[in-house]
Image (cartoon, helix red, strand yellow):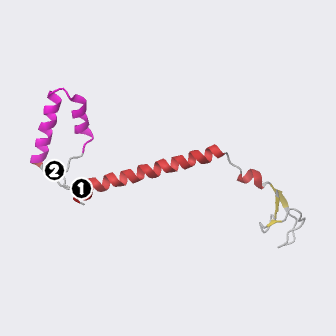
Amino acid sequence: MKKKCPQCKLVNYPTAIICIRCGSPVLWIDTDRATESRPGSRILRRVAICIMVCIAALAGFYISLVFSAQPLEIEQRMIVRSAIEVLDDKGFTSEAMLLRRLAVFRSTDNWLNAS
């Protein structure tokens, strides 16, 4: 426990009755409870920050790969669509759906493959 001056906000010695700086009476403050936090909450906060940093790094990496390559031309898009239709007709419906909805097709290499 420490004593804090209400006027100048100086934290004085525990044995002080008046403030060393301004001379006014000091108040007791409980520093143990003010700085005390549960260790589990600090760990969860660090884990959450780590997960957010990892997601941001992966998103930045993915975006840089997609935007560093040229998109498909119209003829190339038609070829890719017909290839996906062939997969769908052969029974690979879930894979064809993923290719239609999630895959990003590019015509040139990105910076990673180029290096």
Furthest-top residue in view? 91
Quadrant for residue 15, please give it.
bottom right
Q: Is mark 2 on a helix, strand or loop?
A: loop
Confirm or deny contact between disc 2 and disc 1 (CB under 8 A).
Answer: no
Instruction: Say which residue appears at 36% left-offset and 51% top-offset.
Output: 59
In the rendered image, residue 12, in percent from the top left (x then y), is placed at 82, 66
Start and end of the magenta stretch? 75-103
Quadrant for residue 60, please give it.
bottom left
Q: Residues within 10 Å of mark 2 (few under 14, many from 20)?
A: some
Instruction: Say which residue appears at 13% left-offset and 37% top-offset.
Output: 83
Left of 115 or right of it: where is 18? Answer: right
Query: Upstream in the sequence, badge 2 or badge 1?
Result: 2
Specify whether residue 79 is painted magenta: yes
Query: Depth-wise, is mark 2 or mark 1 nearer the camera?
Result: 1
Decide: is 10 above or below 96: below
The residue lying toward the viewer, choosing from 51 and 19, is: 51
Point out the image quarter for the N terminus.
bottom right
Q: Residue 113 — which label?
A: 1
Q: Residue 72 — which label?
A: 2
Q: What amino acid is labelled 1 in the image?
A: Asn
In the rendered image, residue 34, in percent from the top left (x then y), is placed at 73, 53
The residue lying toward the viewer, choosing from 4 and 51, is: 51
In the rendered image, residue 104, in percent from the top left (x then y), is placed at 24, 46
Quadrant for residue 87, please give it.
top left
Q: Residues within 10 Å of mark 1 (few under 14, many from 20)?
A: few
**Taken as a whole, is the magenta stretch helix, strand or loop?**
helix
In the rendered image, residue 86, in percent from the top left (x then y), is placed at 13, 32
Furthest-front residue in view? 115
